[in-house]
Amino acid sequence: MQSNKLRMAIRATAAIAVLGMAGPASAVSFDAGGWDTSVYGYARLNASYDIDEDVSSSTRSFDYNAINVGAAEDNEATGSFGADAFQSRIGVKTTSPEGLTVNIEGDFRGSGGGSVRLRHAYGSYKGVLAGQTWSNFTSFVGNTGTLDFDSLPGAAGYQSRTAQLRYTTGPLSISLEDPKASISGKDVVTFAGTQIATDVDGKPIYVGRITTNLKTSQEISLPAITARIQDSAGGLNYSAAVLAQQLGYDTGTADDTAFGYATFVAANMALSDMITIQGSLSYTDGASSYLYRAGAMSGYVDANDDMDTISGYGGTIGASLNLGGGSSVNIGYGMTQVDLDDAFDAGAVKATDAESISAVMANYKWTPVKNVMMGVEYQYGMKEAQNGDDGDASRLLFAAQYNF
């Protein structure tokens, strides 16, 4: 019995880490014509104080691209404060007497912040799910709870939501998903005046180093295919997944495709009633969009019109300490590393593009009363560019959340 309670507590902790909620069971529930319906959400304030560089963005997420590197690091600003409530959200979930579940949820992070953004919109019945929700190539069991809305770099999988068709049976789930990948085109200096792609309206693109989503410019695109296992054994909770996708382009005069894939493992384990450790490892090749917060291309077109892939790896490790009385302490580290050397030689990326990012954090969370969470967090982030220039930045976060 104690083992079951502990396992449930660990799973709840993983859910809290993702949702940023003081508790997952605070919804307002009622019966609506035989449908078991709940309305849930929260209001949340996120505030940041950037100590040496302005690196905080919407909902006070750490913007690693904003870290200055090389000589620019000497131009650090001091003391930048910001706050917003865009993470606040509301959702409706309802289940019919026959077991059909429908969930619609939104927050206010859309269009830079302040407008409604769709998070979840799906239906599920007897293991079949269709709509938009967390990618099947995602797991939260290895995540350490952060106040940063976007969590640590290197977390397992996509860590976001996408349109998909999924089937789940027991611990196994497989899906077909909207592909998330980008490729870089040929360098304009070498290939000036050559059509290297077309835009969404079919007009030719002749200038610039292009970054484009498969859904807008490339004619060759198949669904991303994923498979994931997620289960528990005693105090251990674990997950592992694989993903495959196609990269490709077709300008009418040249075309090529390549195979991309990604995989991860993630787990957490209770060492005692107070201490839990967790972590994840990831590897990608031709699927950098699924290497969380890496920010790199999945592939590029070289001078021979060949579609080449970019590889990378990442991981996280952390520990959580339950202090009792609604208080907890979390410490964590996350990193990603991508190999951009060949892409740089092909003129597909810049010398200043990030090749490695990492972060360490420590926070204190406090639940003074039910459905209320407050916390403070320190973060230190680092970035290294393809040319070897590096930089770092640090900041403080504060959050206050009120659930219903």
Image (cartoon, grey):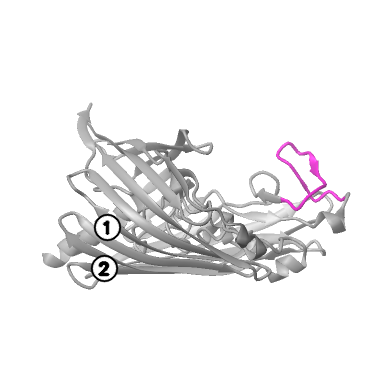
Element carrying mark 2: strand
Task: Please state, as top left, top right, bottom left or bottom right, where the C terminus lies in the image.
Answer: top left
Identified at 23% across, 44% down, the residue is 372
* Residue 315 forms part of the magenta stretch: no
Q: Is residue 174 above or below residue 311?
A: above
Q: Which residue is mark 1?
A: 13
Q: Which residue is mark 2?
A: 276
The amino acid at mark 2 is Thr
Which range is magenta? 194-210
Query: What's the CA distance linking mark 2 and mark 1?
Result: 10 Å
Q: Position of residue 104 (x, y in %)?
A: 38, 36
Return the disc, 2 or 1, that comes first in the chain's sequence: 1
Q: Please name whichever residue, 7 or 242, is drawn nearer the observer in this view of the structure.
A: 7
325 displayed left or right of 242: left
* Residue 204 forms part of the magenta stretch: yes
Q: Position of residue 140 (x, y in %)?
A: 37, 59
351 displayed left or right of 58: right
Determine whether label 2 and label 1 are within 8 Å by CB. yes
Dominant SS in magenta: loop
- How crowded pointer 1 is (Cα within 10 Å; few <14, some 14-19, many 20+) is rated as many
Residue 264 visible in the snapshot: no
Identified at 26% across, 68% down, the residue is 276
Q: Quadrant of residue 227?
A: bottom left
Q: Position of residue 195 (x, y in %)?
A: 83, 48
Q: Please name whichever residue, 237 or 333, is drawn nearer the observer in this view of the structure.
A: 333
Q: Position of residue 199 (x, y in %)?
A: 73, 41
The amino acid at mark 1 is Thr
Residue 130 visible in the snapshot: yes
